[in-house]
Image (cartoon, rainbow, N blue to C red):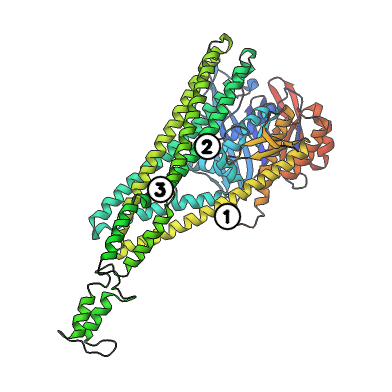
Amino acid sequence: MLLKSLSLKDFRQFKGVQQISFATDSNQNVTMIMGDNGTGKTTLAQAFTWCLYGETSFEDKILLCKSTSGAMLPNTEENVRAELTLDHNGIEYTMISDQRYKKDANGVIKPSGQRSFTIAFKQPNGTLDYVKPLEKEIRMKEILPQELSKYFFFDGERIDNMSKEIRRGRSQEFAGAVKSLLGLSAYTAALSHLKGRGNNNVFRRYEQSYDASSNDKIAEYSTQIATLSEEIDDIDLRQIEIDAEKEAVQDRITDLTEKIAKNKNSEELAKQKAEYIRKRDNLIIAKGEQVKRILRSFNNNAPSYFAKRLMKDVLVSLSEAEKLDKGIPNINDTTIQFLIDRSKCICGTDISAGNDAFIQLTKLLEYIPPKSIGNLIGEFVTLCDVKNKSVQDYFEDFCDLYKRIREDEERHAEYEDSIEKIEKQLEGLESVGSLQAELSRYEKHLKNLESEVIKINQDKGGYITKQKELEAKRKTLANKDSINREIEKYKAYALYMFNTLSEQYETEENRMREKLQDTVNKIFRSIYNGGFALSLDEKYNIQINVIDQESGFSDDVETSTAQSISVIFAFIAGVIKMARESQEDGNEMLVSEPYPLVMDAPLSAFDKKRIKTVSEVLPEVAEQVIIFIKDTDGELADTYLGSKIGKRFTFDKKNEFEVYIV
């Protein structure tokens, strides 16, 4: 994505219609806009996000130029307008935001209606067209998802908060947006098309295609399966909601815990509590793994274990049966009947009613499949022996796992009791009592959410089990009908494609995340020298680890402002670099678009050495850089960015309410 121009009309202090065009040359891809504090740098920077998403961080929400509004007559209207022209995937778009304001009879300026937002684009033949209203949100997500926009349009004053956000638990939406930027959206779109949520996917359409005319039960099973699918989808959606809510609650818990820990009187208690919480949480994870193991073991081995006595009795009965070894390999009742009907054996012996050959063949029909289990008895005996051996140690293993779970539960109760005692002590401290009370409420809410997760996952497991049972029954009936047999076959193909693509996606996503981690680390080390390394988890949260030669990596550590800013720069630069490289990857499933960087006063918190490093790194990794510089930083930035600067602008400030771009 390349930004071509921005046009503003009466947007805050920018009076009248003003336009700025940006450098788009690959060799000189930097647009530098210089100005002192208060001239309009932040206003111009936020014009981008207002134009695209209708959002700003101004305390005064009235965007109309005060010089313009001062000249308005009562009961007249003026509008604020922003037009951002850009190229995305070879298409030129113009994003247009309009907000009308009216001056009432008392001279008060108020918004007149809601902000209007239009997306215009040029067709290949050059004609102008418009994105349909219902498709605007989807198109904006394709161009630049709002949840990631602040990492491409940001200012130096908010960068510390951005660092905290990126190092905390992010939403699935955030992780999804990063994956999209890395070029993985084609995978996710294909997987959703095959077997996504809702009914508009290949798998569900086959589900709805069964022909029930051959058997009424097929329609009954299909209806029940569809209902269970809806229940499972609802649970998945609720899980997403809970995850987002848990992140918000956990953020608040972290903030409150930090505030309490800073209090001198409660510092030691807070430290003890944090240690107990850490041990408790580790115990919860360990217990969860043990529960998974015991359930997996139960699912795999319990049927065979409980059937041991039955298999023993059956094997005794079979050993005494007369029919055990009377089967003939590869001979079935159709073959025997054919010989009888032909009246001649394959050896040439005549077969006629009442003769010895006829009598022997007729008796043989009693033991030949499918009227008898015949040869299958031997296979059954072997299978029983295998199953008995596979569960020989199952009871002892099950008891060991259950014992560990019980021990973990006892230790969990001890930690909870210790935490509760500390909380009561903290509540007694007047300085942190209200904070602790609030913290307790959030922790209780978090536990309730975790309990709900356990409950809905149990429900989901039951629904899935029931669904599989119904699908098995329906499949048995469907295979008796040619039309439904075809549907079963197509479903199997779709499921195979989904599973294969899922494996490919998981492999590719892990590879891309590891590559992003390496890329971010290289950029981070080039900006900030020190014994630190960055790591990314599956949600693309960043941790900063200390490198220690003796003990390896430590836990995530607190960082200084300079380190935090370096993290943000490294992450943003890494994502942009990866987005550019994914275009040249050669994998047709990786589809991405490079993005520009629009930064307001990003260099203010850096020393001279890092200003030089950042100035060298950003134009190399980003396809386009638009940077707002304070006059005091201008000389340094100009020195290091000089050869990369394609366009320069400054501000002509007439007064506090009237500024022009020159």
Q: Amino acid at mark 2?
A: Ala
Q: Nearer the viewer, residue 552 or 173?
A: 552
Relative to the observer, which residue lies in front, 381 or 19?
381
The kind of residue tagged 3 is Asn
User: Could you say whether the residue bearing mark 2 is in a helix, strand or loop?
Assistant: helix
Dot 1: few (<14), some (14–19), or many (≥20) neighbours within 10 Å?
Answer: some
Q: Amino acid at mark 1?
A: Met
Q: Which residue is mark 2?
A: 286
Residue 232 percent location from the top left of the image: 39, 42
Q: Which mark is residue 589?
A: 1
Comparing labels 2 and 1, the label whose residue is closer to the camera: 2
Query: What residue lies at 58% left-to-right and 52% top-to-bottom?
Result: 507
Tag shown at residue 299: 3
In the shown orientation, is residue 367 left or right of residue 537? Answer: left
Q: Is residue 171 above or below residue 487?
A: above
* Residue 376: quarter of image: bottom left
Kindly tell me whether residue 543 is visible in this rendering: yes
Of pointers 3 and 1, the one earlier in the residue sequence: 3
Give the secondary structure at mark 1.
loop
